[in-house]
Amino acid sequence: MIDRTDSGWWRDAVFYQIYPRSFSDSDGDGIGDLRGIEERLAYLSELGVDALWISPFFKSPMKDFGYDISDYEDVDPIFGGLDDFRSLLAAAHERGIRIVVDLVVNHSSDEHPWFEAARSSKDDPRHGWYIWKPIEGRKPPNNWISLFEQRSAWYPNEETGEWYLATFTRNQPEFDWRNPELRKAIYGAARFWLDLGADGFRMDVATAYFKDAKYRSNPFSWNLVPDLLQKHVYDRNRPEVHGVFKEFRALADSYGDRMLIGETHGLDPALAASCHGERDDELHMAFNFDFLFRPWGARSFRESAERWYRLLPEGAWPNFTLSNHDQKRHYYRYRAGADSDGRARVAAAMLLCLRGTPFLYYGEEIGMTCGRIPKAALRDPLGLSTWPLPFGRDASRTPMQWDDSPNAGFGPAEPWLPVNADYKAKNVAAQRADPDSLWNWYASLIRLRKAEPALVSGDMAWLDAPADVMAWSRTREGRTVDVYLNFSGKTRSVDVRAGIAAAGTVAPAGSEVAAGERRLGPYEVFIVTRR
Ligand code: GLC
Ligand code: MG
């Protein structure tokens, strides 16, 4: 059972992101659903995760697969109904697993009744909930672009003779967050889920809520696709957003134990750091995306983590992510032939032992990768508009590989995206049965976190190590855990301190480790606990 008095649970939790279309299909329509997730809760418990972030399952025309919402207070029939959500939440809470819902309120769907009312007349009370500019000639008001359509972000609305703004697809009109009635409506929708018992929100492109008050054109830059030669300084990430973050935080905190994590619209961790607020009075966390863009290497990741820790304001809690539904999976990014599995193990140990909340993406625990999706099977609007360039996101959203049966055990019908070709060899059933599998490696690391609170909430100090080795220690209440990761495919020597081997292959778990030089084999992880 979850503990409703525990307001800091999210600092200790291992999060697991589920893309609901692709996790488990209970009703055989080829699309994953909420019942499918509920049926897999035992699996998630066994893996050991503490909290789920589920990508949007609200009512939606699915132009951006749920990131275009047409009713903030209902579940799309593809995914089930509100009762299925209630049932999933109760069953998850029973197991001590929290659920964070994806709140997509930078924009709605163009089929949301709010937008339908707003576009019908300038006199409609909801008109001002969205962003409008008068049509004067054929030229749009400025140079802002629709990322997913690779063209101007301004679309004509004949009923009112105005442009509306949509910076993803044309079907995702943007709210005017300066409008107090709009804000009230959104806070109402947020309360709806918090009242149902949801444990918080992942806030979609949260830093984009406000645009430049003067609607200035973005300056030129050499960013090519998908940014189309501009630097996005005026259409997103404006300072006014911090006022709304404070309001959201007060709302969430009024429930005691709910958590907000923002997605920034921009990759610089400095932007994510700024969302925490100077007095820890804005979002509880904001995603640090830096690991998603780092080349493989001990130096590279250490630099990234060090910078992130430095950037965070006092009292703010870090987080780390290697994969999500918008970027190429890290198994694919860091693939290196026969070394790929070794690298995935090192990456997992890094994610689960650094100081900060880890976010796993479904399937990473078995090393799911990105395969080639034939053009005819592409679904992602970004992938379609930029094809054949490698920006599409479908390859990161293929069905979860549960076993070697048809459709990889995802469901009885042909799935909405093709299953990756490697599923016969790479699946949950096979890996659970193999004690040396990546799946068992993830599960053992998560168990280790539970056994060693120093790995969860302990202080963090870097240890000296040769190039190719990333080493640090975590300390809490007199207990220390030292972590050594060999990022190379060659043997490397490290100077270790005495202790008990916790995991890894240098010494059997539980054996005594003497101080002195140790050789780490290729991609070896060595974790030593000390008193
Ligand atoms: C966020 C989501 C992405 C979505 C976009 C528009 O970046 O993560 O999947 O397409 O916002 O809502
Ligand atoms: Mg289904």
Image (spheres, grey):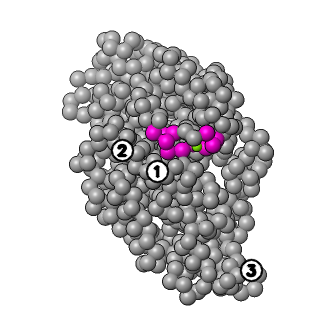
Question: Which residue is depicted at the point 43% across and 51% down?
Answer: 83
What residue is pinned by disc 3? 139
Magenta stretch holds residue 422: no
* Place of residue 393 in the rendered image (x, y in percent of width and height, measured from the top left): 65, 47
Sequence order check, earlier mark of 2 and 1: 2
The span shown in magenta is: 28-38
Residue 287's disc number: 1
Q: Nearer the viewer, mark 2 or mark 1?
A: 2
Circle 1: residue type: Phe
Kindly check if marks 2 and 3 are in contact, taking CB atoms under 8 A apart as contact. no
Residue of label 2: 90
30 in magenta: yes
Q: Quadrant of residue 344?
A: top right
Q: Position of residue 173 (x, y in %)?
A: 60, 69
Residue type at mark 3: give it.
Lys
Label 1 SS: loop
Looking at the image, how many numbered discs can be counted on the residues? 3
